[in-house]
Image (spheres, rainbow, N blue to C red):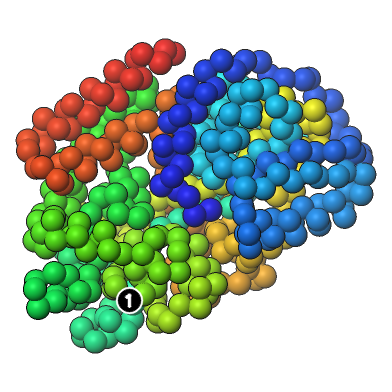
Amino acid sequence: MTRIRAAAAVAAAAVLLLAGCSTGGGDAIASKAPTTVQGTVSFWHFFTGREAGVLKTAVTAFEKANPKVHVVIHDGQDDEKLQKAISAGQPIDLGLSYSTDIVGTFCSTGAFRDLKPYIARDRVDLGSLPAAVRSYTQYKGKRCVLPVLSDATALYMNTDLLQKAGISTPPKTLDELEADALKLTTYNPDGSIKTLGFNPLMGFQENTPQHFSAIIDGKFLDAKEDSVIGKSADWKALMQWQKGFVDRIGYAKLQRFTAGLGQEFAADTPFEKGRIAMVLDGEWRTAFIASDKADVQYATAPFPTASNHTDMYGATYITGNIAGIGKGATNPEAAWALLKYLALDTRTQVLLGNGLKNVPTLTSALNSSDLQVGDQYKTFVDAAKNPRTITSPASKNGAAYLNDFEESWDDYQTHGGDLDAILKKLDSTIDDANALSGP
């Protein structure tokens, strides 16, 4: 689950790909759950390599518990492939996506079947899921997916660099983050950046509006899916702070430094190589650092908040993997059994959490003594349990509104201008797209 940023563009494309999908509810389900499930299940997911192996372990355990079921795994199927396959009517029994941004589109088009009849029949207690997770797995009261682990973000800190700079505690406010970052930034003789304290550029790695939203408890849409971003004094203040931070270092200088860095999901990523002292990143980075055998001493902490939103410290923005039964499923009962096993079984959630180092989406798994919670990973587990942790709302337009916001923010950090006018235009862009897409 290291593909949050890529998911936004793919989810926006899903609106077009799935526009022709039927909104029918699929085959009627049996009044009682079968005592034995059987047959073949076609399971599509996006994991590859080591991560695919972890998921395979869970599927093998499911097959052992259900010996009459054979799961055919199609790994490496990213969201774009999954969406195209479902749109084309391929018989996908269970699809696992890395993007909660597709929930509105998949639920409203019927690409994934409505799970409410299964949930009611089997008396599934959704209270076992944290509130934010329950929120991002339904759209307008329709639940067509269940969660399979989540992603949370926090602050990673190179403890050697912080100690060298005389910084002994994590920053808790944006002003403290900026002061520490400027203190940690070093320069080459020609004035170019040698080591960066924190990269404030919008669009750098995990720097997105949604990942910044917990800083201010930021809201995006109202109940009608119209934008409330431009009406928020907090969003405006956050954007002004971010641009001010960029300007203090220099936009062009940051761009040149960033262009010479390694890739986010490669072993030469800048935090692991000591090029950046602090970075906003997800819990998966703990597994990457271990897998890459990176020579970096680090700690994690909640990301700092705005000074008028210190009540949000310790909370975060959360999203995650979601899975649903495809509209063309040929064995929906066995698919539902596998989905329940992956999403609602505590031992399975713990197994996946330990193996993938993503955050479980069951409260029982988050609190399990079998969950391997080291100091760095604990920050994310605690954030997932925090009742103030937030997510972004599902929309029938997928992630289009988030893409629009990031584009407007990037334009502002690059060129400046009248921020009130920029935000007013952003609201209009989102609202116009919402109106054009119909009810």
* Residue 263 on image: x %, y %: 39, 60
Would you say 403 lies left or right of 88 here?
Answer: left
At a point 81% along the width and 45% down the height, the residue shown is 71
- Name the image quarter holding the C terminus: top left
Would you say 299 lies left or right of 143 here?
Answer: left
Asked if residue 235 can be seen in this view, the reply is no
Would you say 405 lies left or right of 393 here?
Answer: left
At a point 58% along the width and 36% down the height, the residue shown is 81
- Figure quadrant of residue 181: bottom left
Badge 1 amino acid? Gly
Height in image: 234 above or below 65?
above
Asked if residue 413 can be seen in this view, the reply is yes
- Figure label count: 1
Q: Secondary structure at mark 1?
A: loop
- Figure quadrant of residue 155: bottom left
Task: Pick the residue in front: 262 or 25.
Answer: 262
Task: Pick the residue in front: 316 or 407.
Answer: 407
Task: Pick the residue in front: 40 or 23.
Answer: 40
* Residue 13 on image: x %, y %: 45, 29
At a point 29% along the width and 18% down the height, the residue shown is 432
Height in image: 410 above or below 16?
below
Residue for badge 1: 274
Height in image: 325 above or below 298?
above
* Residue 321 on image: x %, y %: 56, 46
